[in-house]
Image: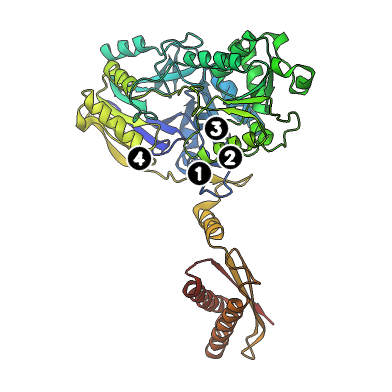
Amino acid sequence: MAAPVHITFLGGLGEIGRNCAVLELEGSLLLIDCGLMFPDTDMLGVDLVLPDFTWLIERADDIVGVVATHGHEDHVGALSYLLRDAKLPLFGTELTLGLARSRIEESGLAQRAEFNVVDDGDTWDIGPFEVEFLPVTHSVPQGVATAFRTPQGTILHTGDFKLDLTPVDGRLTDLARIGALSSGEGIRLLLSDSTNADQPGHARSETSVGTVLYDLMHEHEGRRVITACFASHVHRVQQIADAALAFGRVIAPLGRSMRKNMSMAREMGLLRIPDASIIDIEEVDKHEPGKVCVISTGSQGEPMSALALLAGSENRWLKLTPDDTVILSSHPIPGNEISVTKVIENLVRQGAEVVHSGIADVHATGHAKAEDLKLMLSIAQPDWFVPVHGEYRHLVEHARLARTMGVDPDHVIVAEDGDRLVLDDNGLRPAGRVPADYVYVHGTVGDIGTGVLRDRRILADEGVVSAIVCVDRRKKRIVAGPEIATRGWIHEKEGAETLLELAEKVRVAVQGALNSTDGPPADLEKVVRRTAGSFVADKTRRRPMIVPVILDA
């Protein structure tokens, strides 16, 4: 019997972000991506969300490497956190590792990573795995699909991809090689991007956005143009620059990551902008407004991004005027709609004209849509299929597409975060679970826990009520209080009578408890919490956080 291969999913199945899967063969672990997720609006105060690395850290010595499919944060952004507990060889294309290295170096952990640059078509031996890197098109250059040759056959992971027949850099998704793998050794298991599985048709080519940007530059001649897109979207930056240069504009990067990534992409030959056409943002006012194009970060409405600061009149370099046009060359990531809308609102309040994806076709998705996914399935013809990368509805829809394309329904598995599957001589089947909860990052603090988030939601939704009582347990009497303080429940001046009534309820309950027990302070705290909680709920139909404070005289 051939050695089995285990596949463990630590993130990316049931959400957009935290992409991290682990292949296990003969005791060796090989990661496919290690990404983070940006918080939802209900994750109050949370900066980032990571995969749960508990299971991985316990087996840190078994990790033979991390294959990075491309340079987006949801695929490489968590590496700097895993590197705190494990030394890792990283494998990816030049730009992918360049983007990953930036965050790793900021964390001071570059010495714990080994950077191995791969080229299109390369085959590397990583531990017991033979890994082939195949080019795919996406919204960041140099993305790859990966073919893992194992004793159980070839496992193909598409990475994030689209089928762009006219990409900006001419680098096509290598469907020919995927077809050769399928017709030759066969593809035993396909893991494929599901982000747009519920979107009909084909994904637009990235070059189609260039035409729209050119027309906008023409339409807004004489006005200063400020564009915003992802700093990693080098192809979009190239097309913005091309459109601007066609009308004699200079290019001014705005935002630390935009300046950094543009410089890195130019050094790698991936971004072609003449030196004379790039100016520092400090020099913008030296040029006629109609001859300037600013390329900024902040297209997702991030609170401290360059565009958000500009929209709030807090950007140190630029001030908006009614003669400015702002182009958001992006589409809000699910969960970011409110933030993006707020930025647009603030930009308009300052008199700027705003163009976004709801007005013009200034964005093209980087993910394959339904017809593209069906084409991938028809070429790969996998024996087994697991949809990856997407919310649960995307995974279910992709599974339906696979069955439509002839994959045996019994050979299609919709997995979730934490699931372990085993591929052996008998096929693919579930093999247990590992911890895969969200790990919340707030500032420099790691996992702040679901309990902290729950408390924050209560504070935000219902407020807090504190009851302070000073007691003499020996004499069984209340020395001072109860003193009631509240924030976010009722206004203390308007609710003075209610607060007095609550204080009396607490006083009676505490005195009764003192008369009947010699228990510890925690017992009195329970009495206060129960009494105050019941009163507040009955009086106002609200459930604020109750904070009892018992002081001993």
Q: Which residue is mark 1?
A: 40
Mark 4 or 3, nearer chain start: 3
Say if residue 532 shows up in the picture.
yes
Callout 1 amino acid: Asp
Q: Secondary structure at mark 2?
A: helix
Q: Position of residue 369 (x, y in %)?
A: 36, 24
Q: Position of residue 513 (x, y in %)?
A: 54, 86
Mark sitting earlier along the chain (1/4): 1
Residue that numbered label 2 is attached to: 342
Residue 282, position as x, y percentages in the image:
77, 23
Count residues near mark 4 (Cα–Cα under 10 Å), then give few for <14, some for 14-19, many for 20+. many
Give the secondary structure at mark 1.
loop
Is 392 located above or below residue 244 in the figure? below
Disc 4 designates what residue? 419
Q: Amino acid type of disc 4?
A: Asp
What's the amino acid at mark 3? Gly
Q: Compare marks 1 and 2 and give the one earlier in the sequence.
A: 1
Q: Quadrant of residue 284?
A: top right
Disc 1/disc 3 C-alpha distance (Å): 17 Å
